[in-house]
Amino acid sequence: MSDVLTIENLNYKRNLKVILHDVNLTLAQGKIVGLLGENGAGKTTLMRLITGSAKGSGHIAVRDLEKTVDRKRHVSFSEQLKGFADGTRIDRVVDYYRLVYPDFDGQRFEELVTFLQIDTSLKLSALSKGMKEKVVIALTLSRQVDLYLLDEPFSGIDSMSRKRIISSIIKWKPDDATMVISDHYVTEIAPILDDVVIVKDQTVAIHQAADDIRDEYGIGIEAFYESLYEGGVKHD
Ligand SMILES: Nc1ncnc2c1ncn2[C@@H]1O[C@H](COP(=O)(O)OP(=O)(O)OP(=O)(O)O)[C@@H](O)[C@H]1O
């Protein structure tokens, strides 16, 4: 399996404050990756750096391509909806996606809309937080790319909808694409994760296969994650 994402010696400061330092991370093709860390750890920033909407020093390559324009072409990032005015109808947003992203798959979007029970005639302003999140997920997953970045897709989402979203991720993720999902909670996504990446102390502190964590420490992902904030993990 080849690598989808390679990050080498990435550093990023904002107003002289170090936000992320010495980040090294390689993600293989076909994985579902949990990007975990507490509030303000730098998860969103890391995603912005990957797409090129934030610029740091170091190297970031998606499918060996380093130029921002190439990276944007191969990455579908959930944050992109932020640029639309509140009065925009969902179907107008979809028109925009069709126009701007040649890889946008309208058929796949229709399937997701049905599955996630979205009414596309509504304006963004008429959507609840959870509904908006579903729209973002449908749009993000409807592009055909190598790397998907979902930033906290479960915020404001009730538990039935969470289950649906998790099912949609499994169902619509292309086999050879990699999906990074950021969250503070891991309970619900833990069972579907292949890899766990933890951002702590302004860097990627841990990147391990989920199965290895279970084997090595004899505990689940959630307990492992929590133990990092309680003075480290203990081996069995
Ligand atoms: N626009 C900004 N201006 C100044 N500092 C910022 C800005 N955006 C983020 N930061 C800082 O960068 C750091 C990382 O923030 P980021 O949003 O990436 O974290 P996060 O892990 O996604 O957090 P959360 O889980 O709360 O969304 C924080 O210290 C935050 O204060």
Image (tube, helix red, strand yellow):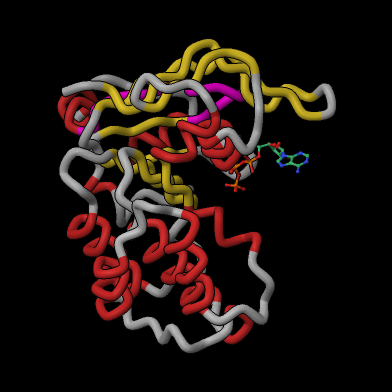
Q: Main secondary structure of the magenta part?
A: strand
Q: Nearer the viewer, residue 214 or 64?
A: 64
Q: Which residues are magenta?
A: 199-210
Q: Position of residue 146 (x, y in %)?
A: 31, 38
Query: Where, quadrant-wise, is the C terminus in this rendering?
Result: top left
The quarter of the displayed image where residue 20 is located: top right
Can you say whether 30 is above or below 159 in the image?
above
Query: Where, quadrant-wise, is the N terminus in this rendering?
Result: top left
44 to the left or right of 216: right
Residue 8 in sight here: yes
Q: Nearer the viewer, residue 170 or 173?
A: 173
Residue 229 in sight here: no
Can you say whether 92 is above or below 15 in the image?
below
Q: Residue at x 37, y 66 (%)?
A: 138
Q: Quadrant of ligand 1?
A: top right
Q: Position of residue 131 (x, y in %)?
A: 47, 77
Q: Residue at x 66, y 81 (%)?
A: 87
Magenta stretch encompasses residue 205: yes
Magenta stretch encompasses residue 207: yes
